[in-house]
Amino acid sequence: MSKRKPKNQRKNSMSDNLDAPVRLYGTHAVCAALQNPLRRVVKLRATANGVKTISHLNAAHNPAPEQFSPQELARLVPPDAVHQGLVADVSPLPDTSLETIMALKRPIIALDQIVDPRNVGAILRAAAVFGAAGIIVTRRHSPRAEGALAKTASGALEIVPIVSVANLARTLSILANSGFLVLGLDERGSRTIDRIDTNQPLACVMGAEGKGLRRLTRETCTELVRLPTGAPNTDMHNKFATLNVATAAAITLYELTR
């Protein structure tokens, strides 16, 4: 008799089944993966319109798409997903080292146990737009790089390196000891992020919505900073003056790269 997995074991953690193929869906996510030489396409499924969408791509190293009806493809993705006529099973991206993104001398974003795949995907998209060196995530309590994450990233998953680490605090210490100014985004920050000198290596840590940064993460940061919201300091306004973490990441990257 097979043992049941504990109820609290997350199936989509980046630490689970790292070598298993990942499923991508949506036009931008699938097309970007098909053009990425670091990907191996295991199986490609498409509707008639989906086949037309990818017809311009060089498919020499990819398998021919199997044609499915929209209803058949819908059964291969989550109930709330929009597949846009394309579903692909592909190999995971190879690991990227911390040293690789440090050497790029561009801002790094670290995520402190952000579990919503759409938030992580949107942060990846902002990182691609503003030219971040990469994203650091924790091996546990982070979504796997597939599905909704890839769909929301809109192709940025193939562009922005992701570094998965076992201990975020230790990684932040490595960055700080290597000359990075490690900023923790926190509403209790002493300065707004637009006051930071950007002529130096920078890393910014984003906490999960609700929980924010964990205690050890906050203590490891060089400095806590907050967003320059310009919000009036009233109880009524402060109840609504909060931002989605992906939006906060985009504003942070804008300030660090402008």
Image (tube, grey):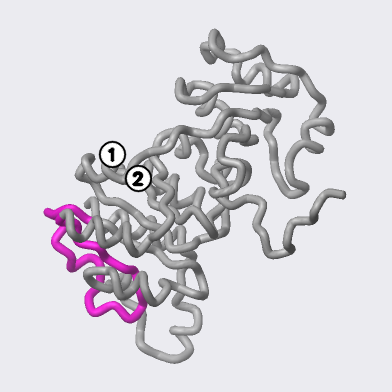
Could you tell me residue 204's position as x and y percent?
Answer: 30, 60
Q: Is residue 29 visible?
A: yes
Local packing at callout 2 (Cα closer than 10 Å; few below 14, some 14-19, many 20+) is many
Could you tell me residue 198's position as x and y percent?
Answer: 16, 57
Q: Which residue is mark 2?
A: 134
Amino acid type at mark 1: Thr
Which of the two residues, 193 or 137, is positioned nearer the viewer here?
Answer: 137
Left or right, residue 53 beside residue 246: right
**Residues at discs 2 and 1 in contact (Cβ within 8 Å):** yes
Q: Residue at x 17, y 54 (%)?
A: 178
Left or right, residue 30 beside residue 229: right
Occupied quadrant, residue 73:
top right
- Going from N to C along the chain, the mark reached first, 2 or 1, is 1
- Nearer to us of marks 2 and 1 is 1
The residue at the far right in this view is: 1
Q: Is residue 28 visible?
A: no
